[in-house]
Amino acid sequence: MSTAQKVQQECPGIADLMLLMASSIEDVARAIDQESAIRFLERILAAERIYVAGAGRSGLVGRAFAQRLMHLGFESYVIGETITPAFRPGDVLVAVSGSGETRSVVDACETAREIGGTICLITATPDSPIGRMSECIIEIGNSHLPNADIPSDFEIRQLTGQYRSISQSFAPLGTLFETGALIFSDAIISALMDVKHCTIEELQDRLANVQ
């Protein structure tokens, strides 16, 4: 049997899988607490500066959010970059962590809290170390951890191939959390555009033109 024949026989339709994921994301969106979402929006609007922290794929979601905030005219930074300035009281740290206990993100949140900043968490696990120090929590789906002994340090999990954000088999390794977190952050950007009365032309003026 050729590879193409095996794929056709054993693999579900790609479009069907996409529709199944879209349906799951719709369920996630309907379950988001609207008061928490409004509180998140208010924290962003009130922030002096906005910092974003995350590891792995969650970190990529955070970077995308920080970039969009910059396009809207906010002063936004990614924790860990060489050009990121010192955190100050009045700043907001947005943590993106499905488990809510990734060691590097926990450390960043603890430091931000000691300095006097506000912590907002996007997570699948609100009852977590980061959740317990956050003023605003956005719950994206839920996390069912199969093994409590899996290390909380992202770098160690990456080296050993152990992952904590487990979703349905059709979207493994935290995919639904990360996709939901990305869509939520884009929805926040859309809401901020309305509140700030931003035009597409204003955003285009801030897009990178030296690449």
Image (tube, rainbow, N blue to C red):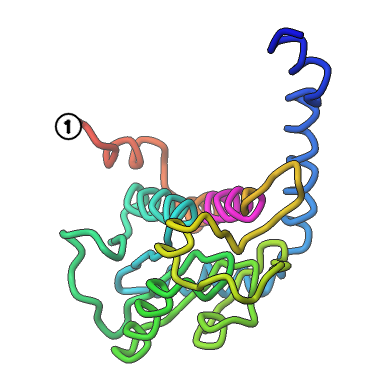
- The front one of 81 and 12 is 12
Magenta span main SS: helix
- Give how far across and how far down residue 76 sits, in percent: 31, 61
**Three-letter amino acid code of the residue under disc 1:** Val
User: Callout 1 environment at 10 Å: few (<14), some (14 to 19), or many (20+)?
Assistant: few
Task: Answer whether residue 196 is visible to the viewer in this image.
Answer: no
- Give how far across and how far down residue 196 sits, in percent: 44, 56
Residue 137, picture quadrant: bottom right
- The front one of 177 and 197 is 177
Taking 211 as reference, is 55 above or below it?
below
Quadrant placement of the C terminus: top left
Magenta part of the chain: 176-188
Query: Is residue 173 a member of the stretch shown in magenta?
Result: no
Total numbered circles: 1
Taking 71 as reference, is 195 above or below it?
below
Residue occupying the point 83% across, 17% down: 9
Residue 184, picture quadrant: bottom right
Q: Which residue is label 1 attached to?
A: 210
Quadrant placement of the N terminus: top right
- Give how far across and how far down residue 100 sits, in percent: 55, 73
Residue occupying the point 78% across, 58% down: 30
Taking 167 as reference, is 7 above or below it?
above
Left or right relative to 204: residue 136 = right
Residue occupying the point 33% across, 41% down: 202
- The front one of 103 and 84 is 103
Task: Answer whether residue 177 is visible to the viewer in this image.
Answer: yes
- Secondary element at tag 1: loop
Left or right relative to 193: residue 5 = right
Furthest toward the front, the residue is 1
Residue occupying the point 20% across, 64% down: 84
Left or right relative to 173: residue 121 = left
